Amino acid sequence: MAEPLRNLYDLTRSDLHALVAAWGFSPVHAARLWSYLYREGAATFDAMTELPARVRARFEGETRIGLLPVAREQRSSDGFTRKYLLGLADEARIETVLMRYSGRVTACVSSQVGCAMGCVFCATGQMGFSRHLTTGEIVAQALHVDRVLRETATEGPALAEADHPSPHHRHERLRNIVLMGMGEPLHNYEAVMRAIDILRDGTGLALGARKISLSTVGVVPGIIRLADEERPMHLAVSLHGATQAERAALVPAARAWPLDALMDACRYYVRKLDRRIFFEWTLIEGKNDGADQAHAVGRLLQGLKAQVNLIPLNPTAGYAGGPSRGEAAKQFQAVLAEYGLPSTVRQRRGIDIAAGCGQLAVGG
Ligand code: SAH
Ligand code: SF4
């Protein structure tokens, strides 16, 4: 069987330079190719007209531009959210979400096909784990959303100006990504970090480190590694329960990485990087949204540089619980404030197309 062609999106800029050098071409061509891929979002080698024909031919023969075909696009009725079902080379599929929140566009990117962590209220967890995504498959999701934005900017105001009629709010390039789609990013550490390095490269898409957020279920060794490697993006940790028993009932991964060890890792991260951690708390009516729970969170996080993001539960097929009402969320926030903890309630967006937190999944 023929070797599959090498996906250019798997390569960091220095990998690409090394390949071009090994083929005996000038580094100028590597730099130009990189900029075609990430500045211009080139979809074909034919579009790379400034590369000499022999360079193009070699790349065309031995590599591919790993764009992911759109199997389906869904748009939320309010116009703020679009969800893409993207096809991978092995027939697996993933979902990627484009979200608009108050003047900025964010890509919610997946890191795995399914997830091994089994959180009871999460549709991705409910589908089980199929495989890790490659670096190139992660990069391609961001490039897909970037392409949609560029096309939309020339197409007209539909997405770019949905709630801001001012031309200053037009978005022509992707600026923000969250690793909060399908999968547990710290379970696929290497591929995810390489993808982030590629997307941050200053001569490419040049995403700002502070415009990237990664959410983890609480993979303790991964959090320690992020701290040791001084990775500059925002970190969010999914808490959902403030005692080991309550947390483990919702988040089975807590059995592997117990709450005490998780909090130690979080304190280490905050100390080492002198940076705030975000904690996510899914608000499930009557289950973890009471004042006693809020006090327990307050005690657990007191003294830590932290912010709590409350996420009213989104519906999934495999879990019967319901979202807390607005009043419960407000009371929860008031208790957290007593402990000096800032908090936000995440806007519910894209629920009509199952594009909310924890709703991403693909059928078998
Ligand atoms: N695997 C990572 C990131 C993906 S999920 C993680 O678990 O952190 C992003 C956030 O959505 C997590 O905090 C997750 O616990 C939460 N979530 C999962 N299912 C949800 C649901 N049905 N409703 C609301 N939030 C949910
Ligand atoms: Fe996996 Fe995150 Fe869903 Fe848990 S919430 S099953 S870790 S994707």
Image (cartoon, grey):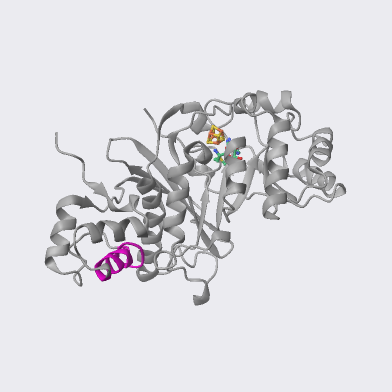
User: As displayed, is residue 232 above or below residue 160?
Assistant: above
Write down the quadrant of residue 156 in the picture: bottom left
Q: Nearer the viewer, residue 145 or 165?
A: 145
Q: Quadrant of the N terminus?
A: top left
**Where is residue 45 shown, x and y percent of the image?**
20, 61
| Residue at point 82%, 35% (across, down) | 296
| Residue at point 80%, 34% (across, down) | 293
Residue 84 in view, yes or no: yes
Question: As drawn, is 253 to the left or to the right of 114?
Answer: right
Q: Main secondary structure of the magenta part?
A: helix
**Where is residue 247 shown, x and y percent of the image?**
69, 28
User: As displayed, is residue 259 above or below residue 24?
Assistant: above
Furthest toward the right, the residue is 338
Q: Nearer the viewer, residue 270 or 164?
A: 270
Question: As drawn, is 162 to the left or to the right of 102?
Answer: left
Q: Indicate yes or no whether the magenta region holds residue 220.
A: no
Q: How many marks?
A: 0
**Where is residue 193 shown, x and y percent of the image?**
47, 48
Ligand 2 placement by image quarter: top right
| Residue at point 29%, 58% (across, down) | 18
Furthest toward the bottom, the residue is 167
Question: What span is colored magenta in the figure?
Answer: 28-41
**Where is residue 273 shown, x and y percent of the image?**
67, 54
Q: Quadrant of the C terminus?
A: top left
Residue 240 in view, yes or no: no
User: As displayed, is residue 39 above or below residue 3?
Assistant: below
Q: Nearer the viewer, residue 299 or 233?
A: 233
Write down the quadrant of residue 71 in the picture: top left
Q: Nearer the viewer, residue 75 or 197?
A: 197
Q: Indicate yes or no whether the magenta region holds residue 34.
A: yes
